[in-house]
Every structure is written in structure tokens, then in C-alpha cells.
Image (cartoon, rainbow, N blue to C red):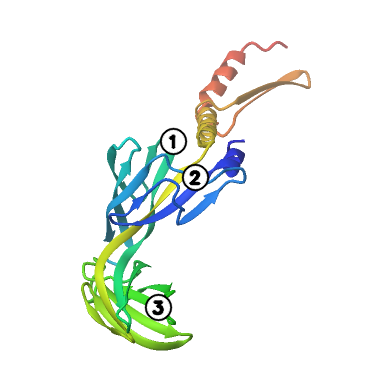
Amino acid sequence: MASLTIVLLEKRGLVELMEGEVYTPGTPWTNEERGLLSSSLRLPWGMRLDRTRAEFWENDNLKQLHTDFSILDPQGKTASVGMQINETIYRDDIRIFQGKRHGHAFYVSLIDERGARHDEILSIPYPLKRDKAGYGEFILPWSPYALKAKYYADATRLSMAGENPELVLRLTEGRRVVAELPLTRGGTGMLGPYRATIVEVKRWAGLIFIDAVGMNGIFFGFFVIVLGGGLTYFFPPREFTVRDDDGGCRVGWQAAGSDRLYRDEYETILNRFAGRAEP
């Protein structure tokens, strides 16, 4: 019943924020899942992503992702919270998890031939290896070209630290590559007919929020299972039988899965019967 309640009423939302970005209640989620009978998840408070930092193993795999964010109460109070992967925070019956998706957001300024400036934010997932790139594709409503971007965690290709990421911009028209331009933080150059400049680079990360009615029932069910298993192990059922057998008596005894532990009980029973048999 608890599982069915969760399926019908659970609300789950994922939001990906850049450092310094504020999420306000009612803003559409980056990704949302909800039960068959539930409405959209709406937080009772806002939040701001203050900082995110990643740690990596020597083989470039993600070791840990830390996130610091602030919960913005409607009354104007601010609470600072720290998160990391495999950690859960509860607030107002809502569970908060640290997602594994993260990366860099590049604030890019593009100036066209007429001198008009177009500001774009290119959020791209973090590369999986120091010598591999993370990729993103973007539509420019004001341009006849599509924009493809990739970036390396570090321009030297020697680190996953991401202190000096390199962004490679590529203008395409269908399958044809019109222009390509590599840039680092603060860099500028010509990308086909446009002058491109990296104005700022920020990190972004994803946070998961879950409002699940019925989870207490699930945990209670697990508690009952564990309690039953413990009782069965420490107090296993024993069976004692006495059957008529050709004018005599056949005594039987067994303990479910624990014969050796309770063997002394069997010996005690035999000793009590010893010498009491009648012809």
C-alpha cells in the first residue's frame, strides 16, 4: 500500500543552477517526474546556488561533488546548507539530494556585422576525461547558423581541476562547418562573421527535490521484515513429536536451521524420558 501511494503521489524535480543563480518557487524545473494523481512539485521556499566544487580520482572519475546553497525563506531568513553525493537533507518534508550532473557555464558575447551584441549562456556537462571534451548544441534565434560547443576541463589537457577550461566554438550550416574558434577565460576572436568573447565562466550543478508520501510506510515495512528475521534467527521454532511405534514410543525433535545451537535442548528431553518408559 505504501509503494502504491508513492507511485500515485510522489513528486520529483531536478533543477540545474549556476553559481549565484536563484530558483524561485513556481519556476519550471529542468526535469520533473510526478505520480499519476499528483500535481507539480512547488517548493515552499526559494534557493540560491552559492558554490560547487568537484573532486576527482587519479583515473579522472568523479570522486565527490560538493554544493553550497542558501534556502531563502519567504519571511526573508536565509539558511546555508552544504550538500554532497550520497547525502540526504530533509526540509519541510522534502528530501534534497545532490545530483551527479555538473559542468561549466560560459557567458559568451557575440557581436554581428551590424554591431549588434548577442549574449548567450552555454551550459555544458563536465568532460569525462582530462583529454576528452564535454559537448553541447545551441540554437541562435537571431543567426542563420547553429552553434556547437565543446570544452576541456583544462586547456593544458593535464588536469580535471577545471581552473582554466578551454571552450571551442563551431558555427555550422547543416553539416557544413562555417567557422571554428578556441577560447579560454576572457579570450576573444572572430567566429565567422561574429566577434566572440568569453565574458565570464561559472560552474553549475543539479539538485534533486523529492516529496514522497508513503516513504514512512516503506521504512516501517523494512523494519518489520528485519525484526521478523531477527526473531526467527535468535528464537527459531522447534518441533517436538512423540509417535506410537509398535507398542513403543518414537521421540523426534528438530530446530529450523539451528539444530546445533539447540542440541542441548534435545539432550534434556531425552534425559527426562530416560528410565520412565513402562513395559
Q: How many numbered discs sit on the rendered protein? A: 3
Q: Residue at x 74, y 19 (%)?
A: 248
Q: Is residue 271 left or right of residue 93?
A: right
Q: Residue 192 at what x, y percent from top left?
A: 33, 87
Q: Secondary structure at mark 2?
A: loop
Q: Secondary structure at mark 1?
A: loop
**Marks 1/3: CA–CA distance:** 42 Å
Q: Residue 100 at what x, y percent from top left?
A: 38, 57
**Marks 1/2: CA–CA distance:** 12 Å
Residue located beneath label 3 in the image: 147
Q: Residue 279 at what x, y percent from top left?
A: 73, 12
| Circle nearer the N terminus (1, 2) | 2
Q: Residue at x 26, y 73 (%)?
A: 198
Q: Residues within 10 Å of mark 1 (few under 14, many from 20)?
A: few
Q: Secondary structure at mark 3?
A: strand
Quarter-of-image position of residue 73 = top left
Q: Amino acid at mark 3?
A: Leu
Residue located beneath label 1 in the image: 93
Q: Residues within 10 Å of mark 3 (few under 14, many from 20)?
A: many
**Marks 3/2: CA–CA distance:** 33 Å
Q: Is residue 31 left or right of residue 51?
A: right
Residue located beneath label 2 in the image: 41
Q: Residue 203 at what x, y percent from top left?
A: 29, 61
Q: Amino acid at mark 1?
A: Asp
Residue 60 appears in the rendering: no
- State whether residue 89 is above or below residue 20: above
Q: Residues within 10 Å of mark 2 (few under 14, many from 20)?
A: many
| Circle nearer the N terminus (3, 2) | 2
